[in-house]
Amino acid sequence: MIDEFNDRWVIGLRGAPVVAVAQASDGKGLTVALAGGVVLTTFGPTLLTDGPATAPDAVALPGKEAVRLIGATVLSAVAFKSGALRMVFSTGHHLNVRSAGSGATAQILSDGVFEWSCREGVSAMKIFGSEDF
C-alpha cells in the first residue's frame, strides 16, 4: 500500500472515494475522510487548487470549496520526506501542504495500517506491524 522512495512515500489511496470534508474553524485547515477509514487532517496553510499548484493558470480555491471533493476519488497521494504533501483528485483538484516555514502540520491516518505526519518540515511514516519503518 505504501511505496518508499529516497524523497517520498507514495501512498496507495488511488480510487479511494472522499466521503466527507470539513473546514477548520480558522479557515486554514481541512479534514478529508476517505472510504475505508483513512483521514487526512491539516492545520495551517492548506492549498486547494483547480489543477496543479505549479501550473501557470492554477486557481487557488478557498477552503470552503473543498466540499467539491465529496464523491471524488483519489488519483494520487504523495507524502514527501521534506514534510510536503500532494493529493490529486478525480475532479482535477490538487491539495497541497507545504513543508518547512509554512506553519502547517498534516496527518494521514489509516487506523491500524499506517500513519504519516509532518510538522515544521519534519515528516514521519509509521506502518503498523512493520519493523521496517
Image (cartoon, helix red, strand yellow):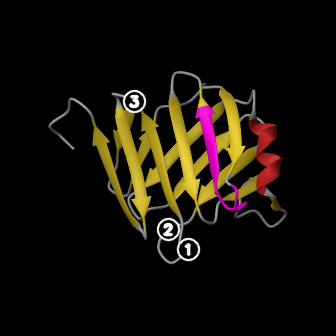
Q: Quadrant of residue 10?
A: top left
| Mark 3 to mark 1 CA distance (whole Å) | 27 Å
The earlier-in-sequence mark between 2 and 3 is: 2
The reply to whether dot 1 and dot 2 touch (C-beta < 8 Å) is yes
- The location of residue 133, given as percent across then percent down, is 21, 44
Which residue is labeled 1 in the image? 102
> Amino acid under label 3?
Asp
Q: Quadrant of residue 4?
A: top left
The stretch drawn in magenta includes residue 116? no
The earlier-in-sequence mark between 3 and 1 is: 1
Quick check: 35 above or below 81?
above
> Amino acid under label 2?
Ser
Return the residue nearer the eye: 93 or 64.
64
**Which residue lies at the image location 29% right of the left edge and 43% below the top edge?**
126
Q: Is residue 32 left or right of residue 81?
A: right
The reply to whether dot 3 and dot 1 touch (C-beta < 8 Å) is no
Return the residue nearer the eye: 46 or 16.
46
Question: Label 3 crowding class (10 Å Cα cut-off): few <14, some 14-19, many 20+?
Answer: few
The stretch drawn in magenta includes residue 30? yes
Which residue is labeled 2 in the image? 99
Q: Nearer the viewer, mark 3 or mark 1?
A: 3
Q: How many marks?
A: 3
Q: Residue furthest top?
A: 36
The magenta segment is 25-33
> Amino acid under label 1?
Ser
Which residue is labeled 3 in the image? 111
